Amino acid sequence: ISVEVNYIQKGILDAYVIINPLTYEILGMEELKHRLDYLSIPVHIKIYKKGEVFSPYLLFGPRFDYLFNYRSDVYDLLFDEVNNFVLVFNAGIGADLLINSNLKGTFELRYNWDITVSEDTFDSRNKAFQVRIGFRFPGKFKCKN
């Protein structure tokens, strides 16, 4: 079982055409940005195929997202419709690669799908793919009984 704590930004970019109401001439575009800041806690079950150098794995489980901040150019009322808590399903594949005895490389591809709606008016659900590349520094932890 693997537990993480992440900071995630989600957002909306609204683009509008500005038109002269008398001539219907297009005057330009206006973009309105809305950003949502989440504390995200994924809890995964990982199934490893342990190898000496290469260890592939599957992972799946829930992710809990909590909205703690937002920024919007104009729509404060829109965020009354945004749910503060969103339940997400995660699934993915990955692999660890032993570089040396003190360092492992890791590559992971995840798919995230909102189970609960993140915004009520339009029944919004986010879906996303993540590509994660990194390094792991093996530690030795001892549990006392």
Image (tube, rainbow, N blue to C red):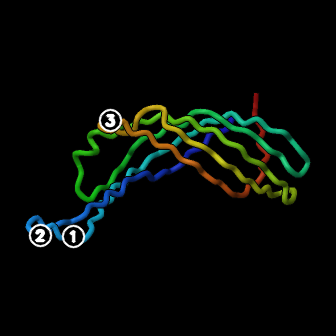
Q: Which residue is mark 3?
A: 120
Specify few, some or many for label 1: CA neighbours under 10 Å numbering under 14, 14-19, or 20 or more: few
User: Residue 101, how many percent across, how many down?
Assistant: 87, 56
Toward the right, the furthest residue is 52
Left or right placement of residue 11 versus residue 58 in this view = left
- Label 2 sits on what residue type? Thr
The disc at residue 41 is none
Please name the residue shown 15% across and 66% down the image.
24
Whether residue 129 is situated above or below residue 28 in the rendered picture: above
Of badges 1 and 3, the one in the foreground is 1
Q: Residue furthest front?
A: 23
Q: Camera-side residue: 141 or 116?
A: 116
Among the two numbered marks 1 and 3 on one chain, the one whose residue lies closer to the N terminus:
1
Pointer 1: what residue?
Answer: 26
Quickly name the residue at label 2. Answer: 23
Q: Of the residues shown, which amino acid type is indicated by label 3?
A: Asp
Q: Is residue 75 left or right of residue 107?
A: left
**Residue count near mark 2 (Cα–Cα under 10 Å), binned few <14, some 14–19, many ≥20:** few
Query: Which class describes the residues within 10 Å of circle 3: few (<14), some (14-19), or many (20+)?
Result: some
Quadrant location of the C terminus in the rendered image: top right
Q: What residue sits 26% from the left and 59% below the top?
A: 73
122 over 9 or under it: above or below: above
Position of 64 compared to 29: left or right? Answer: right
